[in-house]
Image (cartoon, rainbow, N blue to C red):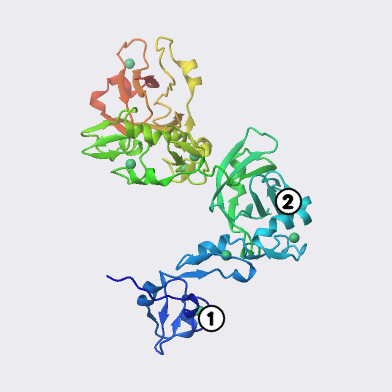
């Protein structure tokens, strides 16, 4: 094969309509043989044909940046204009305070830094942090200057409880990435949550023409923070240096996927018929445990994954956690969602207890334990007595190791039913239930049931219950270590 020696000039490949470079696919050919760019094709041509042959030729050409006249000497490859344009040091931008009619400056992206320092130094803060009074509308634009130079723009509306914001960087060499926002109650600094923020984009003129597009529902956040009147919003903006330190590098995680759910493998991991199984699938009732064995934590794969950064899988959570503790975090994360066993609504973990109590379901705790249980059971955690004469049907719940355990017991004249529901295995614990005759004179041994792991149900026909159980029965519930 002989290499092409023909020199191609970008200025020979212009859109017939807008006269811009044909610098990205698709390129169209009109019936009257004109080459037309993707932006112009709809307005100009009835039946466009895609000009694939020309696209194949143009991948060999470098196009000059549109800001050449302002000093940019970069040439970008076919299809890569957008990427260069957003970060071009010479792109023309307005001052971010133009929207508020404060400043009419415009100039090159690379010089905005100097302009802001010189003209707007009173609007520059060290931290991307601001206080929202939840009872007051608010709207502000300010510059953050730490290791990264960026602008934050927000507006809060008390009627909807919605905070809208944008965050943009003036650093041309920063990769666009998610910001993280910490919300801290002003009256109780211990009350804080961290949420995933919007993309921190390269600053551009479009950004401040419109209402900011990232949204936080402050009504929801308020509940999680115990109803403060003011909330500190602290943005973590990606840094120019050490950007890798806190990033999720997807290469390794994307390579090792769970053979069941196809999500990232999370430790501890298991192996089944030459497939890897993640921690969540292993403990899922839907997955059979046949031929399944745990991969040792000192194996090379386990050690590799332990060092990787994972993004918490719970929606709104902004935490990035090392592989050896990501599952622990996700299970205890306040943004974890539980499905209500009563109304099937999705509940934030941190609000689940209140929700169940709102259904009129009793929360059982160690207090019952102190009150009712003899001290011989040294390993019990919790217990509960019910008397089925008053409560023929009883529902109670508790939380153990961040799992909701929802228990129903139901007596009618034909049978006694005990039912335990939970989402996920509580490790190292067994749930014990005993049915005990309430008469001192009978001295019948208790009937004991052990529940392990997921939802289980035990039904006893009346014939299996001692006669006197029909009148009085104590249900005693406690946890014990395995
Ligand atoms: Zn065009
Ligand atoms: Zn450029
Ligand atoms: Zn200005
Ligand atoms: Zn899985
Ligand atoms: Zn989380
Ligand atoms: Zn519910
Ligand atoms: Zn009895």
For label 2, count other residues whose C-alpha is less than 10 Å away and answer few (under 14), some (14-19) or many (20+): few
Crowd band around label 1 with a 10 angstrom C-alpha radius: few (<14), some (14–19), many (20+): few
**Disc 1 designates what residue?**
18
Q: Position of residue 31 (x, y in %)?
A: 39, 88
User: Is 164 placed above or below 444 here?
Assistant: below
C-alpha gap between disc 2 and disc 1: 48 Å
Q: Residue at x 40, y 33 (%)?
A: 306
Image quarter in which the C terminus is found: top left
**In the depicted view, which residue is nearer to us: 206 or 402?**
206
Q: Is 97 on the left or on the right of 179, as rendered?
A: right
Residue at 48%, 24% in the rendered image: 365
Which element carries disc 1, helix, strand or loop?
loop
Disc number lying in front (2 or 1):
1
Q: Nearer the viewer, residue 3 or 98?
A: 3
Answer with left or right where residue 433 lies relative to residue 404: left
Up/down of 381 relative to 280, above or below: above
Q: Which residue position is annotated with label 2?
A: 136
Pinpoint residue 392: horizontal percent, then vertical percent.
Answer: 39, 30
Residue 189 in the image: x percent, y percent?
A: 66, 34
Residue 23, visible in the rendered structure: yes
Determine the secondary structure under disc 2: loop
If you read the primary sequence from the N terminus, does the residue marked by circle 2 or circle 1 appear first? 1
Residue 380 found in image quarter:
top left
Q: Is residue 355 visible?
A: no
CB of mark 1 near ligand 1 (< 8 Å):
yes
Percent coordinates x, y for residue 213 in the rendering: 59, 59
């Amino acid at each position: 094969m002989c290499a092409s020696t023909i020199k191609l000039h970008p200025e020979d490949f212009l859109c017939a309509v807008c006269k811009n470079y044909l610098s990205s696919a698709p390129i169209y050919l009109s019936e009257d043989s004109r080459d037309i760019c993707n932006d112009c094709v709809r307005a100009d041509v009835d039946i466009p044909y895609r000009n694939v042959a020309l696209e194949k030729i143009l991948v060999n050409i470098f196009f000059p940046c549109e800001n050449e006249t302002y000093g940019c000497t970069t040439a970008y490859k076919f299809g890569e204009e957008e990427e260069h344009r957003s970060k071009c040091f010479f792109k023309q931008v307005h001052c971010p305070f133009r929207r508020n009619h404060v400043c009419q400056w415009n100039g090159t992206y690379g010089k905005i830094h100097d302009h802001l320092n010189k003209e707007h130094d009173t609007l520059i803060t060290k931290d991307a942090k601001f206080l929202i009074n939840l009872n007051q509308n608010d709207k502000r634009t300010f510059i953050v200057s730490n290791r990264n130079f960026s602008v934050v723009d927000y507006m809060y509306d008390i009627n909807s409880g919605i905070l809208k914001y944008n965050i943009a960087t003036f650093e041309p060499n920063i990769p666009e990435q998610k910001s993280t926002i910490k919300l801290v109650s002003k009256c109780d600094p211990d009350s804080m949550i961290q949420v995933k923020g919007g993309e921190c984009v390269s600053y551009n003129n479009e950004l401040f023409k419109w209402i900011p597009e990232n949204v936080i529902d402050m009504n929801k956040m308020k509940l999680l923070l115990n109803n403060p009147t003011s909330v500190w919003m602290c943005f973590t903006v990606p840094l120019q240096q050490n950007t890798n330190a806190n990033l999720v590098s997807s290469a390794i995680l994307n390579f090792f996927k769970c053979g069941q759910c196809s999500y990232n493998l999370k430790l501890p991991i298991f192996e089944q018929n030459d497939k890897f199984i993640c921690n969540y699938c292993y403990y899922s009732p839907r997955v059979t445990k046949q031929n399944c064995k745990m991969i040792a934590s000192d194996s090379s794969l386990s050690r590799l994954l332990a060092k990787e950064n994972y993004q918490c899988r719970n929606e709104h959570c902004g935490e990035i956690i090392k592989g050896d503790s990501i599952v622990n975090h996700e299970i205890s994360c306040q943004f974890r969602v539980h499905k209500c066993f009563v109304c099937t609504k999705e509940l934030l973990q941190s609000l689940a207890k209140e929700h169940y109590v709102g259904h009129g379901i009793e929360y059982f705790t160690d207090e019952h334990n102190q009150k009712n249980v003899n001290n011989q059971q040294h390993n019990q955690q919790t217990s509960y007595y019910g008397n089925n004469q008053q409560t023929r049907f009883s529902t109670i719940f508790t939380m153990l190791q961040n799992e909701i355990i929802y228990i129903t017991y139901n007596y009618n004249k034909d049978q006694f039913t005990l039912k335990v529901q939970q989402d996920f295995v509580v490790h190292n614990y067994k749930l014990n239930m005993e049915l005990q005759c309430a008469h001192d004179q009978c001295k019948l041994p208790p009937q004991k049931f052990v529940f392990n792991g997921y939802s289980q149900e035990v039904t006893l026909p009346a014939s299996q219950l001692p006669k006197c159980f029909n009148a009085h029965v104590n249900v005693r519930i406690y946890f014990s270590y395995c």
